[in-house]
Amino acid sequence: MNVNTQNFPLRPAWTEIDLGRLRRNLQLIRRDLPRPVKWLAVVKDEAYGHGALDVARVALEEGAWGFGLSTLEEAMTLRDAGIAAPLLLLGERHDTELEWCVAHHLTVCVNALHTVRALARLAARFGKMVPVHVKINTGMSRYGVRWDEAMPLIEAIAAEKALLLEGVMTHFSQSDETDKTFANVQLARFNEVLQGMAQRGITVKLRHTCNSGGFLDLPHAHLDMIRTGILMHGVFPSQVCRKIEGIEPVMSVKAQIASIQTLKPGEVVGYGMRYTASSVRRIAILPIGYGDGFPRVRNEGCALIHGRRAPLIGGIAMDALAVDITDIPQAQMWDVAVLMGRQGHDEITVRDIAKLKNSVTYDVLTNWRLRLRRKSVHTVLPALPAMAAEPVPV
């Protein structure tokens, strides 16, 4: 049985990915970026839950230089699907992964001398010149070599004939807040490394520091390439960072009404009897729950049905939740409810879900379970107006 066939019936709860909106977001990002600056699309964790392969294909059409990933499995999924663009593996690689990286033309972040040596031996054995990027720890204190200890590692890479020092990078720990003090400290530390390289005659094609927040708010840090993740999907990394008009969310979460019940006064709903009807109420059951990634809340939140808010009542079960549709008399079986996204003139945002979950937008997007099948739609949007020609230098 092939559950991926088009003939297999979809469950009446799903995530909907608007690839037309994704394309528009990418066009707006590209237009906002100075032309010489390259753009790396970060598609780790299934492109923040949006489907890495579909996102990668659209991003390539819109000018992405390559893709940022976290695991070898993520990279191989794209390679096996025919994606030939550069794939930059972020983080640290175990020695057992390096042969796969060399064999399949993956670009590795190197943070330690032993990785440099092992990778160089494998590259020589395969007869390849393997591109690498050095991660500089400028204060994030996660991966990378400290900025004040980086030069020996960089010199060691430059001396290896089988390795190509293609890039140096760092990662901002706080680029999307109003206070940019520490981000600028990190950039200053990164520039110290670049100055040390210049003094030794070591050059690279790609210097990159900016995540989505840095791209939006730190134009002086764009350098040769920026890395965007959550912004591509229409979610700004914070509420105080710069906004680009026209960027909108790509993902919606939807379900169909699977049951309608009438409650009499004093009757209860769900496990633990967390809701008791004070009057006659009409409720709808949606076949989605915490097993799909919806927050396990009680009597909080809402769904949009016929463009109106239906309050969630009782506790969220693994596979079901209840909403009060007493004030939406036109609601009927198999009507579509929106749990995250827009319907009519109203919207439930990813930030609304994050508040219910007491978490952040990144967590919400990446934690919708795969049993919520992804449904791709392609909204056709008007073409962007032509940009004014850049002045010719005199």
Image (cartoon, rainbow, N blue to C red):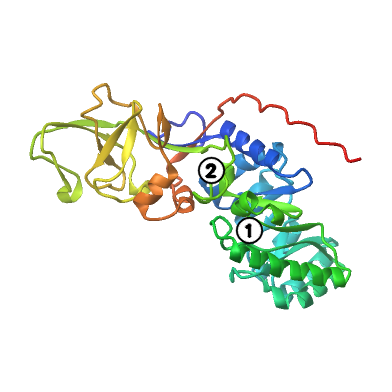
Q: Position of residue 341 (x, y in %)?
A: 43, 36
Rendered view: 63 above or below 218: above
The answer to whether 332 appears left or right of 374 in the picture is left
Q: Residue at x 58, y 31 (%)?
A: 20
Position in image of residue 344 (x %, y %): 40, 26
Q: For the residue carrying disc 2, how many other residues have a C-alpha within 10 Å: few (<14), some (14-19), or many (20+)?
A: many
Residue placed furthest toward the top: 330
Residue in front for this viewpoint, 313 or 191: 191
- The numbered mark, 1 or 2, whose residue comes first in the sequence reads 2
Mark 1 burial class by Cα count in 10 Å: few <14, some 14-19, many 20+: some
Which residue is denoted by mark 1 in the rendering? 72
| Nearer to the camera, 345 or 272 | 345
Compared with residue 222, is residue 155 higher up or lower down, i.e. above or below? below
Q: Residue furthest front?
A: 394
Expressed as whole percent of the image width and height from the top left, the position of residue 141 reads 59, 71
The residue positioned 82% from the left and 74% from the top of the image is 155
Q: Which residue is mark 2?
A: 50
Query: What residue occupies the far right of the structure in this picture?
Result: 394
- The circle drawn on residue 93 is none
> Where is residue 281 drawn, in percent x and y?
16, 32
Left/right of residue 187 with respect to residue 7 in the rendered view: right
Q: Amino acid at mark 2?
A: His
Amino acid found under the numbered disc labelled 1? Leu
